[in-house]
Amino acid sequence: MSLETHIAPVATSRYGSNAGQPLTRRDGLLKVTGRATYAADNHPEGMLFAVMAVSRIARGRVRSMNIEAARAHPGVVEVLTPANRPPLFHDPNERIPPFGFRVEVLQDDSVRYVNQPIALVIAETLEAATEGAALLDPQYDTEPARVGLETGVRFDPSGVGIGGTPKTAHGDVEAGLSKAPIAIDVEVETPPQYHNAMEPHAVVAEWDGDRVVLDMPNQALAISCASYAAFFGIPVENVTIRSPFLGGGFGSKAILNGPQILAILAARMLNRPVKLALTRAQMYGPVSHRGQTWQKLRMGMERDGALIALHHHSLSATSAFEDFLEPAANASLPLYASPAILVEHEGIRLDTGTPGPMRAPGEASGSAALEVAIDEAAEACGMDPLAFRLKNYAETEPATGKPFSSKALRTCYEEGAARFGWSRRPRSAGQMRDENGLLVGWGMGTAVFGCPHFPAEARATLRADGTALVETGAADMGQGAWTALAQIAAEALGLEPDQVEFHSGLSTLPDAGVAGGSGHTASAGLALNQAGGDAIAQLSDLAVNDPQSPLFGAGNIGVTARGGRLYRRDDESRSESYAQILARAGRSHVAGTAKSNRDPAIASGHALYSHGAVFAEVKIDPDLGQIRTTRLIGAFAAGRIINPRLVQSQYFGGMIWGISFALHEEAVTDKRTGRIMNADLAEYHVPVNADVPPLEAILVPEDDAIVNPIGVKGVGEIGITGTVGAIANAVWHATGKRVRKFPIRIEDVMSSR
């Protein structure tokens, strides 16, 4: 055999000076100095401005618009309507997998929800386009809006979420409930919520023949390129998306939407660049949201608190023309060790925009209801809520029997409870007051989120000067991908992060998969790790086969990459720098590549999750009913931590969103018109600084060698999943009032007093 076939793997330090360190954000300086270029900051020469005219009714048709007045306005170039919209290559009423939804792109004059696009005005200035849109003055033939349980149309779905199963059964739930000595029946309602990222959806589209360059915030570059290519009938390589910075996404920016398609179409039609940026109010409709749910949970327990049966049913709202349903009931599948579990979903069609993935889709809504029900079950059994959860702690995934890849949840319970002081909690409600006479309550909730993995690619180039260029089409929407992924790459290459030039946010780079589902760091990170390993292997091959190298002949022994040098494993006094190896070989660089994915056997044989536990304290004014969250402590186990600073930030963000879900956030719909009454950031309430208590996130060590070769899990969404229930349970503990509708209002707390 040749020498090359005997070369041993190149070792890099698993916890070196790069990964595992709390480095500050690589992009931080650009952002705080205003030099980060977001989509709407781009202004190519000759650019036109587009403004979307939207429906003010929820159901009916546009009878007429004053198109002549809009076109006559100074500066208006064109008005795009169903009458003159150029054809699209792909039918907008047909989905494009995996994330494609049916979209509204002026295919007819029908109206299916408020804020649906009904025209696009394009002008030389933003002001002219805005005035032109106002001059359209649309007139409607209106039908009654279907906006609630009374008027919506129920149906049995074929799927939930993105490719999820609407019904899963394990064991005989009805038999278990019938024989259970203790049983509870709980109903919980969660509201519609809207993403409200700091950066609204926007696009700047510029065509050159049959090629188009799109500046837009985007969480799934390669998938989106393929979808836009399908809509416009061009090769996928003719679509370039530039998305170096995203001002938040939360799931909404991985999915194509009608307004962006219309702006791209207008740019092609007029042969000039076109920019469209949605207003804040227009974010409430065509770019998805978290759908409303009405959930019912039935549980049966033995007298010692052991679960016998768990039935979780979710009625989930969707639009009148699509089928995306919040997979809320599936939150009951991976947690508690009941011998019989039934989860099922029913759909209800409303005259609203289509829902879509929103931070912890399904898990956020479903765990809110589940954790309230679990607390109520503990109370019915006369048990402390933590003791009840520990009693029903699952060693394997209950619905499938798969072993968990790691069993750190018990540690999360123990460490979180100890830090919070849970042992001092009185079991009965209404027993604690502070020095000011405020009611005090303590509650907890279990946090869980799956560990998806997307196919990803990367390229790592070691250069003659000893530095590296690392490339992958990753998306950083604020979670710190620029920083964490560069740390993974630097470790794989045996370099310091400041020696690595990191390129991402461009669709022409290797496909980094999807920045969603808390899977981006694991997916793109594994590709980077393997690409770096490939580059080091090539460099090692040059050295161990070169008689002039001190590493010559070390093929069977192997080498270690560290600090920009290769070292013999058996004799570290014999080493050589990358630059020296490349110079002697007459090479300007070596380039490693990788295409990574999860081994299907891993997912089929193991249950892959991040786990945690959240403990909350609330204080409530007994006279006014005002609720304040005054303390939150979360303990989370999420595999190998690449950057503790960024991970803590993600946990805090999720926990703050949990506060928002529990106490603040709700889109309020006028049942007469179907209009969202609080479609702005003044009346759509989210927590401000004064609403956020002291937060603590405990990073529970977890070495999961099964989930993927680098041991990385996701942290972006798990923080919300335990927090909502923890706060609701704390409200009960303070007041004795079980509130089963979110967000919890003052009147809910005061209604029984």
Image (cartoon, rainbow, N blue to C red):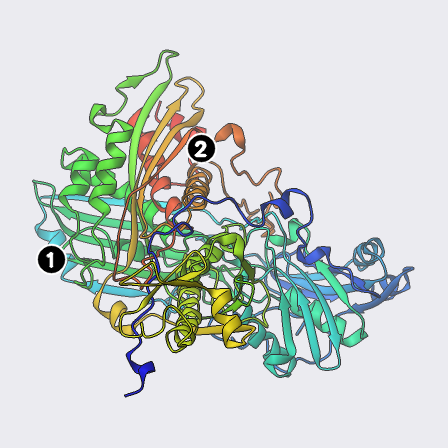
Where is residue 235 drawn, in percent x and y?
61, 83
Residue in front for this viewpoint, 440 or 479: 479
**Quadrant location, the N terminus:** bottom left
**Residue depicted at x 29% and y 36%:** 444
Residue in front for this viewpoint, 69 or 673: 69
Please name the amino acid that badge 2 sits on.
Arg
Find disc 1 in the rendering and name its residue.
175
**Residue depicted at x 8% and y 45%:** 302
Q: Residue 745 bears which disc, if any?
A: 2
Residue 699 seen in render: yes
Q: Is residue 713 left or right of residue 687?
A: left
Disc 2 on helix, strand or loop?
loop
Q: Dividing the picture into quarters, in which one does residue 46 lie?
A: bottom right
Residue in front for this viewpoint, 487 or 121: 487
The disc, 2 or 1, on the residue closer to the chain's N-terminal end is 1
Q: Is residue 502 left or right of residue 561?
A: right
> Is residue 591 placed above or below 309 in the rendered structure?
below
What distance separates the C-alpha of mark 2 from that of mark 1? 37 Å
**Quadrant location, the C terminus:** top left
Please name the amino acid that badge 1 sits on.
Ala
> Is residue 439 placed above or below 524 in the rendered structure?
above
Where is residue 203 drawn, in percent x and y?
68, 62
Q: Is residue 200 left or right of residue 19?
A: right
